[in-house]
Amino acid sequence: MPKNLTISEQPETVRADLDKQPVDVAAMFDTVAKRYDIVNDLLSAGQTRLWRRAVLSAVNPAIGDVVLDLAAGTGTSSEPFHARGATVVPCDFSLGMLRVGRQRLPHLPFVAGDGMHLPFADDTFDAVTISFGLRNIHDTEAGLAEMLRVTKPGGRLVVCEFSQPTWKPLRTLYMEYLMKALPVIARKTSSNPEAYVYLAESIREWPAQRPLGELIRSVGWSKVRWRNLTGGIVALHVAEKASV
């Protein structure tokens, strides 16, 4: 058993620790794969659809573009790129998520891969996107560097991730929801409620908008900018790989 995996007598209570060892995080997501999209829509009050539209708009793929959707899970975030005429490759390290995705969206070429060691050649993709997954990569800098490596010169990075509301009353209310209400709802809806305790804790520890932008820039991405969604509960960071 992986040393950081916390499991009670029933295996569905798998959760990862905040050191985010890949095997632990993958095992945790395996346990929530079947109901993952439904529970996310419920916990976000339907905001996930708005966030996916924002990601699609930020990537703005042309017909024939090749897009890597990293931490794609069951492919819900990938399908809009396919519908727009791009070639999209959903990639995730949770085999349980990939299994559900292949059943639901058999026309998409799901690929198993670790964000710190992507199984793709240099300069492969016109755009790389990751939604609510960068926070789960064990080494954030290594993950961002890998995304830079596989992006074509002039290509784009779009990161959609939980962040910090900019209005203090909303930030206070949001943290109360994360740490108190969200676990209660998860216990009633999810097959693995402990995964959502990890979710809340990892969001609380994640850097705010500007520090994340500075981290993205430090890895070598250029033209880094961001905008807030839902009052800063989510931030959309966009960057480019410099042309040679």
Image (tube, rainbow, N blue to C red):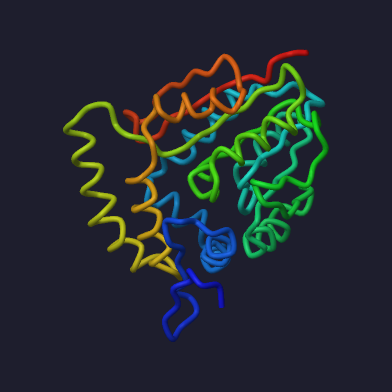
Residue 168 higher or lower than 98, as above or below: above
Q: From the image, which quarter does the N terminus lie in? A: bottom right
- The picture places residue 90, in percent across and down from the top left corner, at 70, 45
Q: Quadrant of residue 33?
A: bottom right
Residue depicted at 61% across the width and 41% down the height: 143
Q: Nearer the viewer, residue 58 or 133?
A: 133
Viewer-side residue, 166 vs 208: 208
Residue 138 image position (x, y, % from top left): 54, 51
Left or right, 89 with reference to 92: right
Task: Name the spot of residue 7 as percent of width and height, x first.
Answer: 45, 77
Residue with the most extreme left position: 169
Where does the C terminus fall, quadrant-wise? Answer: top right
Q: Residue most toward the bottom?
A: 9
Q: Viewed as shown, does residue 119 lie left or right of 39?
A: right
Residue 83 position (above or below residue 214): below
Tell me residue 230's x, y (percent): 35, 31
Q: Quadrant of residue 156?
A: top right
Residue under the image location 71 percent in, 61 percent down: 103
- In this figure, what is the number of numbered marks? 0
